Structure formats: C-alpha cells, structure tokens
Amino acid sequence: MTRRSWWVPLFAFCLLCAACGQTTPVITVPHGPNAPDQISKHYVVLVSLDGFRYDYAKEYDANHLLAIAAHGASVPDGMIPAYPSLTFPNHYTIVTGLYPEHHGIVGNSFYDPARKQRYSFTDEKTSTDGSWYGGVPLWSLAEKEGMRSACFFWPASEAEIAGERPTYYLHYDGKFPDEKRIDQVIAWLKLPAAQRPHFITLYYANVDHAGHEYGPDSPQTAEAVHHVDALMGTLEHDLAGLHLPVDLIIVSDHGMAKIDGGWIDLDQYAPLTDFVTVGSYLYAPSDAATNTAYQKLKAADARFMVYRRANVPAELHFNSNPREGDPIIVAQGPYAIRAEGPVAGHQDRPPQVGNHGFDPFLMPEMKAIFYAEGPDIRAGVTLKPFENVNVYPLIVKILGLKSPPVDGSLNVLRGVLTPDAAQ
C-alpha cells in the first residue's frame, strides 16, 4: 500500500471519530496496514467490567450477560484472579498470561528496590513508562506480527511495551461517555480491512467505583451492574450488525468484599521507621530488619498472616520478586491493612466501604467473570473456575498468533472453542 493510500482511509477514520463527538482523541501510531496474511483472520473484542464480582449477574439480574452465558461460554462459579486481586496487576495478567510477580506489576503501587523508585498507577510518569512492564501484551504481540490492534482504555495500554504500542489508543479519561466508547469500537471495526484492528480492548470502571464507595450489596452497585449490562447488550447488537467474525470476551479483574472494621496499622506491632512502605508492602533496609519485623508481626494479629517472601504459599505465585517486599502480609479476611497511618497532624480517612486485593483462594468474593460468544466459541459451555492467566493463550489461538512463553495454558480453555477453532 502506498503512503497516500494509507492516509486516505485514516483521514476518513478521523472524521468518523470527530462525528462521534469524543473529547479525548484517538492516538494513531502509523504502523501501516495489516499484513496480507492477517486480514482474513477473525476479530476479538476484549471487554473489562472492572470490579464485577462473579455472582453479580445472577444477584442483580444482568440479563444480557446471562443471555451470553446461555448461548456462549461462562464460568458460573467465577474466574480466579491473580494475587493480589487488584486492578493493574490483574488487567496486565489477563493481557500477558503471566502472574504479577513474573510481569512485574505486583500491585497498583509498589517499590522497586533495584531501581530505588516507586511505581504508582496514578502517576503518569510510571504508569506510561514501558520499562516497568514485563511480558508481551496482546496488542504488542499482534503488532509484532503485522496485525493491527486498538485499546479503548486498558491498564498499561498507554506505554510502549516490548517495543510496540497499539495502532489506536487513548489516554485514560474516566469521564468519557460510556455509550460513545462503544461507538468508537464499532468505528474501528468499520475501517477498511487493511486498517481495521483485529484485537480491541474496551474498559468500564462503573461497577468497581460503586462497590468501593457503597459496598457490593448496595443499590448503587446494583444500578451500576444494570448499566454496564445494558451497555453489553448494545455492544452485542452493534457487533452483530457488522456481519464480521467477531468473538466477544467479557471479563473482570476481580470481585469485591465489604470491609470489616477500621484500619490495621502494622507499625503498631513492629518498628518500621527505616522501612520503605507502600500500602501494606514492606521493604526493609536489611535482612536483619526484615527478620525482626517478621518475628514481631507473625503472631501479632489473627486477621493477617505474615511470611518471609520465599515462604509465601505457592498457589499465590507471590514469592520471588523483590518488588513484593519482605516480609509479606496476607489478610485473612476483608480487613484494611496498611503499614502505617498518616503522620501526626494529618487527617485520616476510614477505609473504603468495599475493597479487594485479597487471597482469591481464601475469599470467593474476589472471583471475577468470564463470558464469551462468537463464531469461535461453542454454545452453552460452562466452565469450572480457572485462573485468569489462561485467557491470554485462548485469545492468541483465536487470532492465530504465536505465543511467547507464559504461565497460562491453552489446554485449560481449549474446550471453549469450536472444533475448527481448536485445531
């Protein structure tokens, strides 16, 4: 394709974006057209409904999601998030197939002892710096193989990772109108085949925000569930109107639990003056200090367990990355734990009504959703709970890409695929 023939449809696309009335512009990376062997492949739209607990659809009558479950694939007892069951670690696990300790985003915020720097998802300098991120996210994998991709918000999608960015992406704007996000996804899929992205992400935070502020059992959370469910109905309808082979996969990153009690401050049990602390993560100045804190904390309070990093239970996959800290605190229930409260004279705030981040094997309220439908998905498939690292190899298979080594396995979800797609 000539330079001129590439920019003509791109100009038309920009006009379409303007027609959608969006306030946050789409950023376009000039990767060129889809490679010839990618154009005929199927499409995947991956949607995240942040904080949508596994049982919300039945509890709050999310009829569109329940209909997708009936004629597609679902996991009624919940998809298992990676530990910690937090937003950035799990969104990045879903798109890399790696546990947080392997891709490096071990919390929404944490400290890296080697870099001597803090990472925070709210700090644009770190959240958009690709050097913090390991693994190969799906959009980078697609771009490396000449397949165009698009991200309508997804944690880490604004960073250059593994040498790539998605062809189309936006800077995060939580106020971007919900319905117009769907309009943009449809606009991308109406592009000429050469420029049309085959892998697209879409993100909504409504349910998570309601769960934090009002709790998982609140009318406000029920309302947020109904809202995003209606959006999924609109998306499903609009995708069907395109008459393209699109597989729709809807997930969440974690669930939600009502917090029990007030803050638990770790410095009330052990001196942490010389530690670097981020939330409940502890980074000691020496191994001797680590061991002293461990000894004082391990029998301090039945509401949490304390481990030396190397001894964290294997099923949590949280025992080998220095970014995790040492010792490591694992809550034994829905308790709000932090290293220390605010300094004297500064206002303290109570914990949020609802929260997450807890051990999903201990607390089923942390489990997430998985719904899938489309030409490559078998009808009426119900799955037993599985870890979310296995979503990555499923999408790689549908898109016909070559996967790097990951923690997930296609064998876990191969039964979701139709016989032709599973070959």
Image: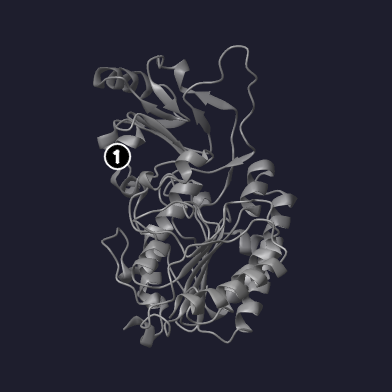
Quarter placement of the N terminus: bottom left
Instruction: Answer yes or no: is residue 86 visible.
Output: yes
Q: Residue at x 59, y 35 (%)?
A: 260
Expressed as whole percent of the image width and height from the top left, the position of residue 96 reads: 37, 58
Compared to residue 83, the image places residue 141 above or below, namely: below
Q: Residue at x 42, y 82 (%)?
A: 41
Expressed as whole percent of the image width and height from the top left, the position of residue 110 reads: 42, 35
Q: Residue at x 33, y 45 (%)?
A: 101
Expressed as whole percent of the image width and height from the top left, the position of residue 5 reads: 50, 80
Please state if 185 lies on the left or on the right of 390 as rendered: right
Question: Could you classify mark 1 by the number of other residues whose Cα lies within 10 Å: few (under 14), some (14-19), or many (20 or more)?
Answer: some
| Nearest to the observer: residue 379 or residue 288 | 288
Q: Which residue is mark 1?
A: 321
Q: How many marks can you see? A: 1
Quarter placement of the C terminus: bottom left
Expressed as whole percent of the image width and height from the top left, the position of residue 62 reads: 66, 66
Instruction: Answer yes or no: is residue 380 visible.
Output: no
Q: Secondary structure at mark 1?
A: loop
| Nearest to the observer: residue 409 or residue 127 | 127
| Nearest to the observer: residue 160 or residue 78 | 160
Please state if 128 lies on the left or on the right of 275 as rendered: right
* Image quarter of residue 227: bottom right
